[in-house]
Structures are given as C-alpha cells and as structure tokens.
Amino acid sequence: MHDQHAPLLPSLSPAGTLPMARGGLRCLPRLSMWLALLVGAAGLHAQPAPPTTQRQQELVRMVRQDCGSCHGLHLTGGLGPALTREALADKPIDSIVATIYGGRPGTPMAPWKAMLSEADALWIAQQLFAGFPESVKDRP
Amino acid sequence: MKRRHCLSLLGATSLLLGGCASLAGSPGAPAALPLRGTGDLGVVVARATGTLAIVNTSERAVLAQVTGLGDLSHASVVFSRDGRYAYVFGRDGAITKVDLLTQRIDARVMQAGNSIGGAISADGTMVVAQNYTPGGIKVFDAATLALLADIPAEYESGKRSRVVGLVDLPGRRFAYSLFDANAIWISDLSDPARPVTTKLPHIGKQPYDALVTPNGRHYIAGLFGEDGLAMVDLWEEPPRVRRILGGYGRGQEPLPVYKMPHLRGWAVAGRRAYLPAIGRHEVLVVDTETWQEVGRIPVAGQPVFVMARPDGRQVWVNFAVPDYHRVQVIDTTTQQIVRTLEPGKAVLHMEFTPRGESVWISARDDHRVSVIDTQTFATQATLAIDSPSGIFFTARAARLGF
C-alpha cells in the first residue's frame, strides 16, 4: 500500500497552483498534511491519517451520490467516465488522486479540494481501485 | 390471458378499472383500485433503490411504489399524452413504461449501455432516448417500445458523440446536441423508417444541455467549454446557430462546477428567459425578443435548475453541492430574490403543480419530498421517499419540451 502513495507527490504538488477561485485559502491549514505526505514519501512510514470511519461513510455517500451525478450511482459512467475497478485498471492511482483533488482542466471534472482533503482524495482513489463500497444504509 | 384482455379494455376506457380487476379475480390480479383521472398524478424517482413512487398532488400522498426499474441515477421521465403512462429513462439504458393507473410496469426495454434521458413526440406515438453509450438517439413506438429508428451521433468516421439536450419539436422532429462534436442536430421523423437529419456544426464548445422555448421556436444549448449559449431559431429556413450571452463570464476565472446545470424545463417568464450561468453563482436574464442580456441575479451557489412557476411570476432556483440545502425564489417583477428556503439536505429537483400553487421539492439526504405553498412558502406536507431525485407531474404531457 505504501508504495502506491510515493508517486502521488509529484503530481499532487501542482494542485495548489491550479485555478481555484473558491476554497483556496482553506488549503493553508493543510500544510501539516503536506508535511505528513512528505514524511511518508521519505520512507518514514508516517502516512497521512486515513479518514475516520464516520468520514469514510460520508465519502462513500458523497462519491455514490454527488460524483454519481456525472459518473453514475454505480460509477458506470455518464458525462464523466466510468470509475469501476475494471475501468481504472490500467490507470495510475496518482493521476486519479490528482484529478479528484485538482480537477481536470478542459473537461467538466471540477477540483474537489474545497470539500476534500488530500487524505480523503487518496482514500477515495484507493477504494475505487479496489471496487468502491456501497453506501451504508443511512436511514434512521 | 383473461387479465390481458381486461387490460386492453382498460386502454379503451378507464371506467372499467375497478370492475375489471375484480372480474379478473385470479390470484395475483391487482386489487381493485379506485377510479381516478391522471391529471393530478405524478412520479418521484427514488434513485438509490430503482423505485418509482406514484404520487397524487391533490391528496399529497404516495399512492404506490413501483420497483425493478434498474439504475435510476439521473433518471428522467416523460408522459404519454393521455397522462396515463410514464416513460422512465434510466442511466443503465433502460426505458420503462409505467402505468400510473394499474401501478405496474407495462413494458420495458434495454436500449443502450448508458442513457441520459428522453422525449416524446407531440402526437404521442414515438418516444426517443438520448444516449451516451453508444452515442446517439433511438426512436421507439410509444405503445410497444419496439425500435423504430436508430440515429448514431457519428460525427467523424468511427467516432460517436454523447448526446444531450434532446427536445421534441412540432412536426415529429427532435433537436439534440452533441457534447463531443460541438454540434446541434435536428432529426425529422415524419417517416421513422427514413429519418432526415439537419446537422449544425461549430455551435460552440461542449454543449451540456439544452431547452426549447414554450412556443417551440428557439432551441438553446448551454455551453460548458465557453461563456455563452448557442441558439437556433427553428422558424428560420434553413435554421442557423447564433451565439447569445457571449462572454457572460467577463473573463473571470470560473468557479468549480460540481454539478452540471439542467436547462430542460425552461424558465421563460413573460418576455424574459432565466438561465443558469456556468461557473458563476448567477442567474442570467435574457430578453427573448432581442436575445440581449437584461440582467443577472446573484444567487447562493451554482444554479442547477432554474424553473419558472407556470404563471411566470416566480422563478425557483436550486444549487449544486455544497450549496444544495438551499432553494431561492426570484420575483420576476423586481428581479429580486424574495425568499431563501432550506427544505432539506441535498435538494435535487423541484416540480410545480400544474397551476403552480404548490411546488414539490426533493431532499435526497433527508429522504423527504416537501410540498410548499408558493404564495406563503409554508410547508403543506412532507412525504417520506428513499433518496428522492426527479419529480415529474403528468401536466408535462401537455407541454412542449418537457
């Protein structure tokens, strides 16, 4: 798993410079996250803390429902491409993380960094590559 | 067989409905349903469970849940002209024809790998699906869902575009936009065996959705790839494309668009049209005589649906994540926002009752549909529905472009 994180950094680095009219300031408190990533990349095994269980449930619902607007509830694609495990099989995970976080200019894929941390984006990408979990039944 | 015979009788007159069900009397026959018209009926898509809720807007109640409709993310619905059947276009490429009276699936066909919506001809004989995969439109017999025509959106050899913005036009024609080909096509299906397609290229970058004005004259496609919209005057011969609201972003960096606006369900009020800006938290106001911008109204987020109350006095706006707990109301006499409502978490859609005295609003994450009085803004009722998204009332059957 850790090997997958290391190549993440070079492509994530420019994310902070991507055009982002909203939420740019919110990146500042994430310096600590960057440090954690850097330390992780240096091989000191201090990865960014994965999202909490509650946050993971929020992320699953967000991906299924909000990302699902373009990618489909079942992530089989729509205006956006399919995000199933099979569809992503030959894609580098670092580019998926960078796309989630920083968007993809020239396409409708928006940068989600106003709503996601880097750790969130990484966790989402990892789940996509593993086959994304179903939403937890959230009705009371 | 006996019941099938009964159901075909129903097609002739729904007066037989109650009696027919009891005559059939066989196990599994539908219970006797009350005699009713369809003018105050509608459907709500429960997207997460592949279920369609049949609702009554007079009783403000769910009458039935129809299951087994497949992947209903981004499902949309059109109605037969008698208001009896809902045609549900699913993401997974299925068209399901649901009978609102017997509350059952009447017909169902898998017609594509990935679909985005559909339309029905004014004469009610054809339903048309717009597809992403494989890109194009397909035309079906509205009674049987048998395939009548297949028009691939092939814009270069071997390349097919995703199709968006499909609308019905007078004269058995349909207009649609090609997201990947920057084109608008108009297919004349007077003879479905021999469709005639007029192709308008170079309309602008990445059309993402479109609308037709209530008189059927102007087809307007929103552009994701640039500031402005592409408009076709369909009364011109030959039709040609012109740019409207060009450069509305004024060169400013666009805000992230977390969900594409939807243009279908035009918001034309009086002589003004209200349109969502892309990448700007604004509603653009355009004069439909001159097609010049006459105003812009700052709103609470990226607008998704901008919908006029049927009388045109108000325009209601909902928003993309993360601002989708709000709904704002514009008074079209003053161009001011007169109310900001918070009807629930993740508001996905709004639908006015036929005369607009109420609006139904779906709040996906609260699993709730709220019925709101459009004069007093009081909540008149709430209905519990699992992850509700689109709301569609049968009055759409009588409206061009819905």
Image (tube, coloured by chain):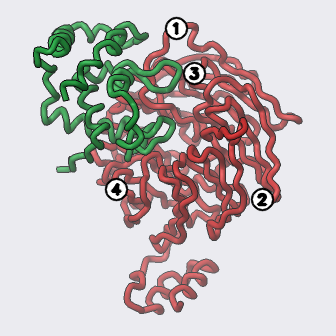
Dots 2 and 1 on the same chain? yes
Q: What chain is tagged by disc 2?
A: B
Mark closest to the chain's N terminus, 3 or 1:
1
Instruction: Give the side of residue B285 with respect to residue A31, left or right.
Output: right
CA separation in Å, label 2 and label 1:
46 Å
What is the crowding at mark 1: few (fewer than 14 residues within 10 Å), some, or many (at least 20)? few
Disc 2 marks a residue whose amino acid type is: Pro
Q: Are marks 3 and 2 on the same chain?
A: yes
Name the residue tied to disc 2: B192
SS class, disc 2: loop
Q: Position of residue A76 (x, y in %)?
A: 43, 45
Residue B370 visible in rendering: yes
Task: Tell me, yes or no, whether the two marked residues, 2 and 4, touch with CB atoms within 8 Å.
Answer: no
Element type where label 4 sits in the image: helix
Tag 4: amino acid: Thr
Disc with the residue nearer the chain's start (4 vs 3): 4
Q: Amino acid at mark 1?
A: Gln
The hue used for chain B is red
Subunit bearing disc 1: B
Chain letter of the residue beneath label 4 in the structure image = B
Mark 4–mark 3 Cα distance, whole angstroms, equals 36 Å
Q: Hey, what amino acid is under mark 3?
A: Leu
Contact? badges 3 and 1 (CB < 8 Å): no
On the picture, is A120 further left or further right than B83?
left
The hue in which chain A appears in the rendered picture of the protein = green
Instruction: Give the alpha-carbon distance from disc 1 to disc 4, as whole Å.
Output: 41 Å
Above or below residue B337? Residue B143 is: below
- Seen in the picture, residue A83 relative to B48 is either above or below; the reply is above
Q: Which is more N-terminal, label 2 or label 3?
A: 2
Residue B280 or residue B384, whichever sits in front: B280
Q: Which mark is residue B49?
A: 4
Output the chain of dot 3.
B
